[in-house]
Image (cartoon, helix red, strand yellow):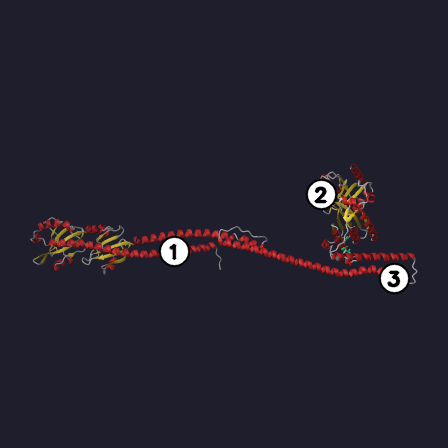
Amino acid sequence: MPQRTIRFWLTCLVIGCVLPATLGSAFLFTISYQQQRTILERNTIATARALMQAIDAELFGAQSALQVLAGSQRLASGDLASFSRQASEALPNMGGNYIAITDSTGQQLLNTLKPLGELLPQVPPSAKARRVFENGQPVISDFFVAPDIGQSAITLEVPVFSSGKVVYSLAMGIFADRLADILRRQNLPPDWITAVLDGSGTIAARSQQAERYVGEKGSASFLRRSAALSEGVTETVSLEGVPTLSAFNRSPRSGWAVAIGIPKTTLTGNLWRSLGFNAAVTLALLALSIWMARAIGMRITRSIRSLHAPALALGMPGLLSIPQNEIAEVDDVARALMKASEMIRERAIEREQGELATQKMVVAKQIADRASRAKSEFLASMSHELRTPLHAISGFAQLLCQPDNNLVREKRIRYKDNIMESSTQLGKIIDDVLDMASFESGHVNVNCEVLDCLEVMTEVSSTLEVSAKKRRILFTADTSGNLPSIIADRGRLIEVLLNLGSNAIKYNIDGGWVLLTAVPYDDVVRFIVRDTGKGIPAERHPEIFEPFNRLGVELTQEEGAGIGLTICRRLVQAMDGNIGFESTVGYGSKFWVDLPVANETAAKAARAPSLFAMPSDTRCKVLYIEDKIPNVELMRAIIEDLSNTRFIDAQTVAEGLKVARSLRPDIVITDIHLPDGNGFDVLRELRGDDRTAQIPVIALTADAMAANMHNMQLAGFDHILTKPLKIPELMNILHASLKAA
Ligand code: ADP
């Protein structure tokens, strides 16, 4: 089905309304025209009849007067001279032009137009004229041209009796212009053609072009159609060639007829004028209506089109807002769209929530599966873990218990040491598992007290140094600083640091580094264990604190149950601390533990003045911001050789700035490329802070390109050193700077 616009349908509606009304009014006009025409025909016939009667009255009145005159004594006595006078006097009242007396031979004896005694013509009488003598009846002649007078005329002829015989015919001549006067007196419309025709159909008088057509025969078609009728209406063409509607009336007495021709243009003019006016008004109305329909159509279209964009936007996120529409129905649709948008949004939210719930369920299931898998693996590895020390204990115990045992003393001591070491290991495993079990049931026993950080670090270092040595790992602990006391459970903190330290050793590479440091931040002390080991893949970071999850190392020779970090986190959280890590594959890992600083009163109370009172640290502080441990260790070795100097290191820009603001070092040495920014950031931030703006900053860079050096100079570093480091150069700078400090 072809598609049409609203404007098209509105135009059709207008045409559909206007056209029938127009056709109806045209029909009514036609009917009214027919009725008017019938009335006009009737009226015209009546007019023709009245006209005929007027002419008849004129003619027969004159005829009666003529008959009276025919009985005149003067005529009977043959006194023609006296009769001629009498006739001439009566003539104006009778409406004639002349009076003549003719005998049966056609000889005129008297003619009032001629002087008496003049020789008058003899005209053979016409058949009608003869009837006067033969029947003694009056006659009205047809129209003729009087030969002696040369004028068109008719005559009324009456017999003149003498002794019962017709002796003369007394005739009165009436000229054509007298008949024309009768027509003129009727005051008919000027375009109507009125004609008086004698008994032979000759035109005796005519309202138009009389001089041309009077004396001529009427139009043949009219004569033919009207011949047999006394009156009627016929459509003919006038002698001038004008189509007319002709009404006629014929006098039964004289045989004369009156015809009134109304030009068809006059007749139909009104109709056409009315129809034309009707058509013009209709067309104007139609044009106006179509224009209005199109204007309204455009408005409706605009309103409907305004919903187009919102309808398309239904599929987009967010709620629809459609301004009020001037068309109520369109506004209803707009409201419906907004409702639909609301419903779609609700459905989307429900769906999202459903999807989220499903995802959560999937994740929960994955975690549960993994936990279950890990638990199974844990049981397997636990059995292995327990059996390994048990095997050693049982084996060495058997060796010691052999009856014929004559072992040398050193061997016996070594066997005993092995048994002791294995049983310690076994005890540790069992403690871990019990810890884990008690955490699972929600019990974490910690006894927090005020602790000296360096003392804890020293104890941890002594244990880790031994195991690091066995694995050929370089272990360093920075216990030279002056750290505030913290609130923590001593045993649990040592357990945590040992766990982190032994992981750093276990998952390290041959000849790698492990570094244990601590820095004070605002209201915490951060313990940091860094290594140059294999690192942990980023995608496994989220799993690191999951119990029994060994991130794939269960396939290697490394011993472990995958619960060390879980226990660490629970313990740290129980001590109101925080634990976190950063790790990059092939680069190493850094685990940190933040524990709250003890307030001064508690710290003082906890310290035994004689044993633990420590003078405030008056050494110069050198902060080195560098992420590569070997570089840090080199710098530590250099700085620690200087007397009265304390070395502090930080791995990132953020960490370095935090330490600088908190400890206010006397000098800052920074690497240029750092994990979270660069040395320029360090310089800018230090200079921008009142607390650190005055601290000299040395840039230590491996990029000795002229452009880089130039940039660093522009940036405002106090000194710029390049790698490999020239130690004497650094020493000079440090001596100068620290002396000034
Ligand atoms: P495990 O008994 O396996 O050492 P942990 O809970 O202590 O259990 O550690 C969980 C896992 O985290 C380890 O199995 C290891 O894959 C990874 N991990 C822990 N510390 C480090 C580190 N310093 N370097 C690399 N991987 C580590």
Residue 97 x/y as whole percent: 16, 50
* Residue at image mark 1: 21
Amino acid on which the number 3 mark rests in the picture: Gln
* Residue at image mark 2: 681
Find out whether the residues at labels 1 and 2 contact each other: C-beta distance under 8 Å.
Answer: no
Q: Residues within 10 Å of mark 1 (few under 14, many from 20)?
A: few
Q: Is residue 108 visible?
A: no
Q: CA distance from mark 3 to mark 1?
A: 128 Å
Q: Is residue 363 left or right of residue 195?
A: right
Amino acid on which the number 1 mark rests in the picture: Ala
Q: Is residue 296 visible?
A: yes
Quarter of the picture holding the C terminus:
top right
Amino acid on which the number 2 mark rests in the picture: Asp
Q: Residue at x 42, y 54 (%)?
A: 14
Q: CA distance from mark 3 to mark 2?
A: 65 Å
Q: Earlier in the sequence, mark 3 or mark 1?
A: 1
Q: Which residue in the rendered view is the most extreme toward the top? A: 740
| Secondary structure at numbered mark 2 | helix
Find out whether the residues at labels 3 and 2 contact each other: C-beta distance under 8 Å.
Answer: no
User: 416 or 736: which is nearer to us?
Assistant: 416
User: 567 or 661: which is nearer to us?
Assistant: 567
| Secondary structure at numbered mark 1 | helix
- Of the residues tagged 3 and 2, which is closer to the observer? 3
